[in-house]
Image (cartoon, helix red, strand yellow):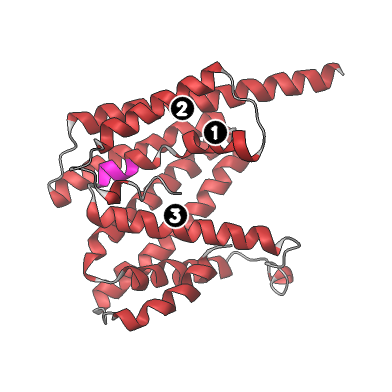
Amino acid sequence: MLSKNQLGFLYMFLSICAFSLMDLIVKWSVDYPIGQVLFFRGFFGIIFYFFIIPKERFHNFYKTQRPGLHALRCGSGLIALIAIFIALRQLPLATVVSISFAAPIFTTILSIFLLNEKVGIFRWLAVIIGFVGILIITEPGITELNIYYIFPIIFCFSLAITLLSFLTIPQGWVMPTLNHFILLSLIGIFGGVANLWLSQSYKFSEVSLVTPLKYLALVFAIIFGYFIWDEIPTFKTLIGALLVIVSTLIIFRREIYRKKIITSRSIND
């Protein structure tokens, strides 16, 4: 019988595997329009969730008292997904995964302006380290700047993806073969189960324990990129990825520390 922490690790590992396979197929699907790939991600993601909705709640499972926030979540999620899909087609797999690890860095920065949070020296240090890592990976310059490097940084939306993807039909969708149809369908299925397993991981285990496991995605990206597309990550990419990982780990550790302080104060009060 697995403990809760072991279950959390297992679900996180499965989530990483599913996300990695989804990224792999998206990168492979270069012959199909982005809008058509988004349709498969959204539609088959929805089908998957229909099987896990409790029967007694089927009629009201997705009702919400905060439609505005859900719309915002759908919009931001859609932008993130499109950005990642475009980046996966234009950049090495390991590079995209490395830059995507920078999400906690931007969350920390936005928390200052949107939530009025106070950020201490350690988290500022983490942000600086993370940005240095991103600069090393992207090598920004007037002549060398590749706009696709920006896409992975920009980070209830399966339905929105499906509906909005129909707007891209006039751009020319491609009729897939049976084998390709199955592979494209797996984008939605892998994306759906990956999100579910990620939620289960956080449910059974502390975020601090399972989050470092996310960086296995970089290992998978390097392996897939090398054996399928002959992509060899540069030394700069690896160094930059390491700095970004160190940065996010510092942020997570500081969050844990802050929560412990707040909890202890509440108990003492």
Residue 154, x across and y down, in percent = 43, 48
Give the dominant element type of the magenta stretch: helix, strand or loop.
Answer: helix
Left or right, 243 with reference to 259 = left
Identity, as a three-letter code, of the amino acid under mark 3 = Ala
Residue 24, x across and y down, in percent = 28, 55
Checking the image for residue 80, the label placed there is: 3
Vertical order, 50 against 135 (above or below):
below
Q: Residue at x 28, y 50 (%)?
A: 147
Identity, as a three-letter code, of the amino acid under mark 2 = Val
Q: Looking at the figure, which quarter contains the C terminus?
A: top right
94 magenta-colored:
yes
Part of the protein shown in magenta: 93-97
Q: Residue at x 30, y 53 (%)?
A: 87
User: In this rendering, does residue 22 appear at all?
Assistant: no
Checking the image for residue 108, the label placed there is: 1
Q: Tell me which corner region of the image, top left, top right, bottom left or bottom right, holds residue 259.
A: top right
Total marks shown come to: 3
Identity, as a three-letter code, of the amino acid under mark 1 = Thr
- Element assignment for label 1: helix
Question: Badges 3 and 2: C-beta atoms under 8 Å apart?
Answer: no
Q: Looking at the figure, which quarter contains the N terminus?
A: top right
Mark 3 or mark 2: whose residue is earlier in sequence: 3
104 magenta-colored:
no
Viewer-nearest residue: 146 or 71: 146
Residue 257, x across and y down, in percent = 62, 20
Vertical order, 149 against 241 (above or below):
below
- Element assignment for label 3: helix
